[in-house]
Image (cartoon, helix red, strand yellow):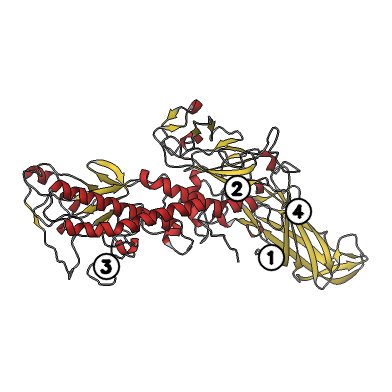
Amino acid sequence: MRTVPRDRRSQRGVALIFLMTIVVLATSWMMVSAVKNASSRSAPALQAQNAQVLAQAKAALLAFVITSAATSNTGSPYYKNPGRFPCPEDPANAGSATNAGTSASNCDTLPYIGRLPWKTLGIEQPRDAAGEPLWYVLSAGFNGDSATLKINSNSSGQLALNGVSNHAVALIIAPGAAISLTPNSAQQAAGCTARTQRRDATFASTPDYRDYLECQNASNPVDASFVSEVTGNTANPVFNDQLISITSAELMPALEAVVAKRIETDIAPVLQGIYTASGWGTASNPLFPYAAPFADPSAADYKGTAGTTQGLLPLVRSTGCSGAACDATFVSWKTSPAPTVSRNSGASLYTTSTSTRAPVDPSCSATTTNVTCVFYTASGSMNVEVRATAQNVAMALRTLDSDGAFTGLTGTGATGSFNTDGSALISLDGDAGSGTAATCTFLGFFNVSCRRRAVTVPITSVLADHYVLNSSDAGVGWFTANDWHTLTYYAYSPNFSANVTTRSCTDSGTPTCMQVANLTPANKQRALLVLAGRPLSGAAAGASCASSAQTRPAGSANSYLECDTASGISNFDGDLSFAKGRYSSAFNDRIVVVSQNP
């Protein structure tokens, strides 16, 4: 059974998460105890208290999301969708002595309003200055069915705040004391509805958000528009919600750090070992697959191209797929050179020139999808070797499978060797099936019994799509399921291409290895990945590190990667030099080393 390493956390990552957790635990007492002193205080003081409680709740929620994204539990929905937010509290648990504060099991209809799931977050229940539990609004796109949910650096919140669309991923709201709303015409036009709020401290019935939130925040049905103030509220109070938002800009820096670590743990080893695994014979002479030329990642075909050593990962699939990155014949059998079959041991192989003559000589033919060999033999067991050439193997990610669904061949062993054009010669050794009864001739005069045997080898049975391409794979499927591959730039030293006989790179003199500024060691990298962060409005992505706004999707690498202004090195110009820069409003690339010299 395949196993995937699961040590998610670097020392730096552990320290960050630990620090966030300590801050949350240290302040949770303050979130509750401050309510006890809320009486007889001015409105500004109460607002300041609410602001503190809301900020601490926000820190707890973000800490939960980031810690959950780093989980090693492959069955967890947070593992499948790093960056997933918990649902609000299950309303059925509001009055439960044991389950209050527990997140609902699903909230597929988003946006969703409910109370903050404090128990799920691992904190004491936070209350506002009026002693009320906090409420929580979750945007679409950050929870839901793992089979369709996609969260990555391009994800943005879909909650509008005060008329600003796509502002927030989540909102946390201090509801304040219950009030009776009698809105005037201007307030009604702004979304306020007359209501006398009624609250049951025992929650004998499911709490209604309209008895806690007001005006546009209490729209029925729930919509994605929220406000922090209402017109004319001083003269005619109809609104006392106080809220804080979580934006994608606040979420992504920490989430991208976790995802980069997961790429280092899950994806880098695949690239390092895919064509050095048993059967390829390249363990001491490593080879990296060609890159797909950089193109709009949302529409690219992800087909590697000979000579291309930087761009997108070659993730083209042959089965179980659709769209531009799906091509059943990209990796396929070649008709020339023609495939062959030969005897290794066992029953005699007959030809038209042996003493026992076959009707025809052993022959093999190839289509793009199948190699078929027919040959005549004596009775009895027989071990044969089938050899055929597959095109574009070094331009894709494929697994050499000796246990595939072959017809007329069992107990197989598979090996492969690369040709300089990126094709691969595949050899299959196995026991030929018993075949069917046939008639051969002895010395050309006497009819004798023999066996007609046939072997069929489908291309997808011996060169299957690698499991990293499967978005449903329990271990690594998260990478493509959430489209993180569209934000991952792939680069390697040309010295490790299929057209190089002895593959190595030098890290001294004039280096032929990759060189990464601000990384130790800086010039030993054979291959690397660069994870693009969220698009930046002031990215150092222009000529000579000039500021340039990034818009996506796009067909140019500088819409995803940046230039490190300190070193003057660009990560998008296609040379061997890269930079691990300081994370900022102008630079948010993250370098993941795939392989390096000792």
The label number, if any, that marks residue 195 in the structure image: none
> Which of the pair 256/346 is nearer the observer?
256
The residue where tag 1 is placed is 407
In space, the residues marked 3 and 2 are separated at their CA atoms by 45 Å
Give percent across and percent down for residue 540: 46, 31
Query: Tag 1: Cα neighbours inside 10 Å, few (<14), some, or many (≥20)?
Result: some
- Gap in angstroms between the C-alphas marked 3 and 1: 59 Å
Going 59% across and 55% down the picture, which residue do you hit? Answer: 465
Q: Which quadrant holds the N terminus?
A: bottom right
Q: Residues within 10 Å of mark 3 (few under 14, many from 20)?
A: many
> Decide: marks 1, 2 in contact (CB < 8 A)?
no
Q: Of the residues under marks 3 and 1, which one precedes in the sequence?
A: 3
- Spatial CA span between label 4 and label 1: 16 Å
Position of residue 343 in the picture relative to residue 292 (left or right): right
Q: CA distance from mark 4 to mark 2?
A: 35 Å
Residues at marks 4 and 1 touching, judged by CB atoms closer than 8 Å: no
- Helix, strand or loop for disc 1: loop
Is there any visible trace of residue 17 in the rendered image?
yes
Q: Which residue is mark 2?
A: 594
Disc 4 secondary structure class: loop
**Measuring 74% from the left and 69% from the top, which residue is drawn there?**
433
Circle 3: element type? loop
Q: Hey, what amino acid is under mark 3?
A: Ala
Q: Which residue is mark 4?
A: 339
Local crowd size for mark 4, using a 10 Å CA cut-off: few (<14), some (14–19), many (≥20): many
Q: Give percent across and percent down for residue 223.
A: 23, 51
